Image (tube, grey):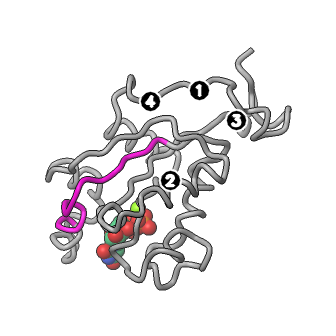
Amino acid sequence: MNQESMLERTLVLLKPCIVMRGLMGEIITRFERKGLRIVGMKMLQMDDELLRQHYSHLVSKPFFPILRDSMQASPVVAMCVEGLEAVRVVRAMAGVTNGRDAAVGTIRGDYSMSGQQNVVHASDSPLAAKEELARFFRPDEVFDFGDINLDVLYAADEVDRKA
Ligand code: UDP
Ligand code: MG
């Protein structure tokens, strides 16, 4: 089995800034429109421990308390997003961290003017995606869509079918 033909899963968080702006649907629609499959989704309030784990690489930064407050300002929406090379594709869709630098056409480029209130989190590597998905979803909260609609999303030889 070719590694490239395996569907990959990645974590997306809709941050409080976009939840509170009432624009969750617009962002969710972008992933659906692209042809990615949302195979898990829930709303949750991030507590201090989850935040420190999720942003462990930033805990010692001076801006961490501000980041923590912004991430706890409302619930977030966590999504498990599936597709071929989903980690790389979703990062590209998100754009660079600072919304003012992000290219127009990317999510951050289209919806953010901030280096912090930047709409989405997206896992930055397949390893991070695995760890982050395990942090946000129990196994029974992520669903197997099987081969449904793969024929219209991918060429016959691009993705391994179950059968
Ligand atoms: N962040 C910030 N100031 C910084 C760097 C990051 O407020 O100087 C916030 C921002 O919301 C970013 C998050 O911390 O999305 C995680 O930072 P990371 O470097 O992992 O960026 P990302 O992977 O989200 O692009
Ligand atoms: Mg990151």
Residue located 19% across and 60% down the image = 72
Element under label 2? helix
- Mark 2 neighbour class, 10 Å CA radius: few under 14, some 14 to 19, many 20 or more: some
Q: Report, in whole angstroms, how far the alpha carbon at label 1 lies from the one at label 2.
A: 18 Å
In magenta stretch: residue 77:
yes
Q: Report, in whole angstroms, how far the alpha carbon at label 2 lies from the one at label 3.
A: 27 Å
Mark 2 or mark 4, which has the lower sequence index? 2
Q: Mark 3 — residue?
A: 3
- Mark 1 neighbour class, 10 Å CA radius: few under 14, some 14 to 19, many 20 or more: few
Residue located 49% across and 72% down the image = 108
| Left or right of residue 135: residue 67 | left
Which stretch did the figure color magenta? Answer: 68-80
Residue 115 picture location, percent across and down: 37, 79
Q: Report, in whole angstroms, how far the alpha carbon at label 4 lies from the one at label 3.
A: 21 Å
Element under label 3? helix
Q: Mark 2 — residue?
A: 28
Beta carbon of the mark 2 residue lies under 8 A of ligand 1: no
Element under label 1? loop
Q: Mark 4 — residue?
A: 142
Mark 4 or mark 3, which has the lower sequence index? 3
Mark 2 or mark 3, which has the lower sequence index? 3
